[in-house]
Image (cartoon, helix red, strand yellow):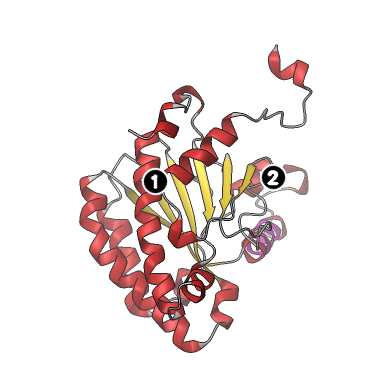
Amino acid sequence: MSDLLKNINKDKIPQHIAVVMDGNGRWAKKNGYLRAIGHKSGVKAVREVVQACDDLGVKYLTLYTFSTENWNRPKLEVNTLMELMVDSLTKELSGFMKNNVRILTIGDTDDLPNRCKKKFADAVSKTKTNTGLNLIFALSYSSRKEILTAVKSITNSVLNNEIKTEDINSELMDKHLYTAAIPDPDLLIRTSGEQRISNFLLWQLAYSELHFTSVLWPDFKKDDLFAAVIDYQQRERRFGKTSEQIKK
């Protein structure tokens, strides 16, 4: 057992961890490989994090897998990423089933190539009755677009006299987001030393704890996840209140 795992308070495990998996390209360049090799090596880190979350009893893990902005990358790299997602999901699905992992997706999955879209839809269907870790892939995802889509939907409801403007509140907004059935993240982890959100879960991260690490994603291991959770557990989450109020 990891020494770090022994130091984690099992009574204060974050229910939902979100991860910006950054640094595949830089890892490849650093090691003299093509960018595609960096992305393939990143799959091992996904496996490590899924296992670490399962060890801790985390209920939700959201991975920023492919953003809408990523479509602007060179076509060869985009095609490589799409094929890698299909191949990786094919190889990992039996393990997900064995470990009771439930697959979910958020984002505009209709924008994905048909083979990729069908593979994820199949994984969602096959794992829908699993009751362990909820593994959420953010695919062709843009938080700004998600929020705008929610606003348009709510606006249409008002125009159609289905709701009144005074009915609009945070809870209603939550129901119109991709993450309607998913609790907000307690902890966001971003790898590679970058310290920004990059259009990821902007609404949902309002009170999340942020953990930035210089570790490049392909090098991210279980102990790195455990270290992030220990860091999280050392913080005081006040949600706008004072320390005295929290301690009462």
Q: Is residue 229 left or right of residue 41?
A: right
For the stretch drawn in magenta, what is the main secondary structure? Answer: helix
Q: What secondary structure is marked by label 2?
A: loop
Residue type pointed to by label 2: Ala
Where is residue 103 drawn, in percent x and y? 35, 53
Lower sequence index among marks 1 and 2: 1
- Neighbor class of circle 1 (other Cα within 10 Å; few <14, some 14-19, many 20+) is many
Q: What secondary structure is marked by label 1?
A: strand
- Which region of the structure is painted magenta? 148-156
Residue type pointed to by label 1: Asn
| Residue placed most toward the observer, 52 or 178 | 52
Corner quadrant of residue 37: bottom left
Q: Residue at x 40, y 45 (%)?
A: 222
Q: Which residue appears farthest toward the top when viewing the image? A: 248
Where is residue 83 drawn, in percent x and y? 35, 77
| Residue placed most toward the observer, 19 or 162 | 19
Q: Quadrant of the C terminus?
A: top right
The image shows residue 171, relative to residue 152, as above or below, that is above
The image shows residue 185, relative to residue 68, as above or below, that is above
Q: Is residue 137 left or right of residue 67?
A: left
Give the labeled residue for mark 1. 134
Give the labeled residue for mark 2. 206
- Neighbor class of circle 2 (other Cα within 10 Å; few <14, some 14-19, many 20+) is few
Q: Quadrant of the N terminus?
A: top left
Q: Residue at x 58, y 82 (%)?
A: 72
| Residue placed most toward the observer, 141 or 164 | 141
